[in-house]
Image: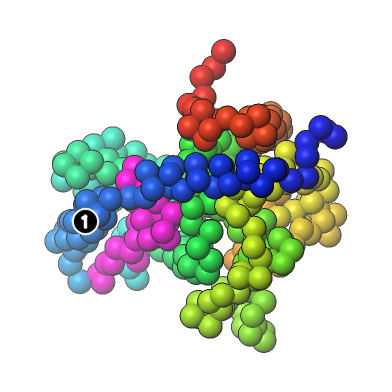
Amino acid sequence: NSFIPYFLEPQQEDNISIDMIKLYQELLPKKESHDRRIKFVKLMDRLMNTEWPDHDIKAHVFGSSVNDLGTSSSDVDLCITTPWNGLRNVKTLAKLFRKSGMQHVVCVPRAKVPIVRLFDPELQLSCDINVNNTLALQNTKMIKAYVALDPRVRPLIMIIKHWTKQRLLNDAANGGTLSSYTWTCMIINFLQQRQPPVLPVLHHIENENKGEDYFFDNVEKLKGFGAANQESLGGLLFAFFRRFAVEFDYHTQVVSVRQGRYLLKTEKGWDTGRNKMSLCVEEPFNVSRNLGNSADIASVQGLRCEFQRFLEMLIAGEDLETICAPYRAM
Ligand code: GTP
Ligand code: MG
């Protein structure tokens, strides 16, 4: 791997930064997409509270519709909260949505978190719905806070997410790869580890025995944190791919946003079983969970090839549109 340089020429780095800004502008969601989402959530809220009044049912949006990392084509992630037990079985929800005109209504009752998935033909939106999984609301707030801390975070993550979708590396449920959330944690942790850091470790700030779901969320107080780091978008993109193509030790290291560094698989007891060969990414609020375990050995090999491919094409001066061309099986 010695042929991969540590840095790009300044001129090439600038070209990549300009290319990134252009792609970022195209990926940003339109106001129209925002308005459709708001309509959709109101509709869902009304459907449920008309069918089951008096159960204090609320629909909360989480994920990329609210963490500033979504595009116009992102799905809507909904968390239904209610003290009532009647919605524990997601099939009950599915029945209501089917008779309300939603399409492709599918239950995934045995997933880590049981969900109903559907498509609203009128508003042209796909949606994943869970009941009472409030952890996802908390980790969405954390992502949103990290995104707000430095202006480089949003374009960097949106561009890498775009690449993961184009190259079919973003389907934890069916494709055996990684979720957007897992990718986002990898990028945040990478930015925490730059010298000097672009992002702080929100779990460590003012945390005196504050409990598992704590993180520092006063973004205003941390504005300008990353200013000492002068790396450009292009430089950061190159460094991220260099990190996961050649530097990261997949056999021993664990990505930890909670700690802002790499942990060792041995210290987490993740050096056996499925985790041994996985790309290990610690869930920041539930540290016994490996977000990377959706990818099997073959997928991790495939991922590493894709990191290499990206890096080589970037070094060769290809533009992002070419590098992010949709994956086609040979
Ligand atoms: P896109 O839909 O691809 O634009 O991105 P997204 O940010 O919405 O990600 P995704 O749909 O994969 O997940 C939505 C939200 O669900 C995330 O923001 C997390 O809050 C949560 N989530 C997703 N996957 C996991 C997981 O494996 N573990 C936990 N704890 N939460 C998850
Ligand atoms: Mg989503």
Task: Check the image and report above or below for 302 versus 48.
Answer: above
Q: In x, y percent, where is residue 13?
A: 62, 45
Q: Residue furthest front?
A: 11
User: Mark 1 belongs to which amino acid?
Assistant: Asp
Is residue 61 shown in magenta? yes
Q: Position of residue 302 (x, y in %)?
A: 66, 29
Residue 296 visible in the shown view: no
Inspect the magenta stretch and tell me whether residue 39 lies in it.
no
**Front residue (pair 152, 66):** 152
Residue 227 picture quarter: bottom right
Q: Is residue 195 left or right of residue 219?
A: right
Q: Which residue is mark 1?
A: 35
225 w.r.t. 33: above or below: below
The magenta-colored residue range is: 55-81
Q: Residue at x 25, y 54 (%)?
A: 31
Q: Quadrant of the C terminus?
A: top right
Q: Please tell me how many numbered marks the rendered image carries.
A: 1
